[in-house]
Amino acid sequence: MHSIQTVKYICEKYPSGNCYYYKREIITHDSWDKLESLAWSAPRPITKETFLKQKQAGYKTEINYINKQPAKIYQLQT
């Protein structure tokens, strides 16, 4: 179990209205005493309810607005 200092909850919002929720934890590759061995884990999907519950409990949360251009569609010649 991670503490408030070692975990963060992320919400990614897209222009389409879709929201995706993730959890990231600080992990170590060697020892907790060596700062260079600390890194954020891969994002793990969570539910909106979990995100809101942990936000209310005081955990660090961040909301990222993703504004990517739509993909270009090319017509293939056959």
Image (cartoon, rainbow, N blue to C red):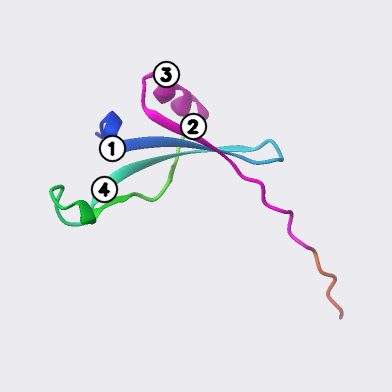
Residue linked to disc 1:
6
Disc 2 crowd, CA 10 A, few/some/many (<14, 14-19, 20+)? few
> Residue 22, image x and y in percent?
46, 40
Looking at the picture, tell me which residue is in the foreground, 78 or 66.
Answer: 66
- Residue 51 belongs to magenta span: yes
Disc 4 crowd, CA 10 A, few/some/many (<14, 14-19, 20+)? some
Disc 4/disc 1 C-alpha distance (Å):
8 Å
Amino acid type at image mark 3: Gln
Quadrant the N terminus occupies: top left
The mark that comes first in sequence, 3 or 4, is: 4
Residue linked to disc 3:
56
Highlighted magenta segment, given as a residue range: 48-72
Disc 3/disc 4 C-alpha distance (Å):
24 Å
Q: Which mark is residue 47?
A: 2
> Residue 20, image x and y in percent?
55, 39
Looking at the picture, tell me which residue is in the foreground, 50 or 6.
Answer: 6
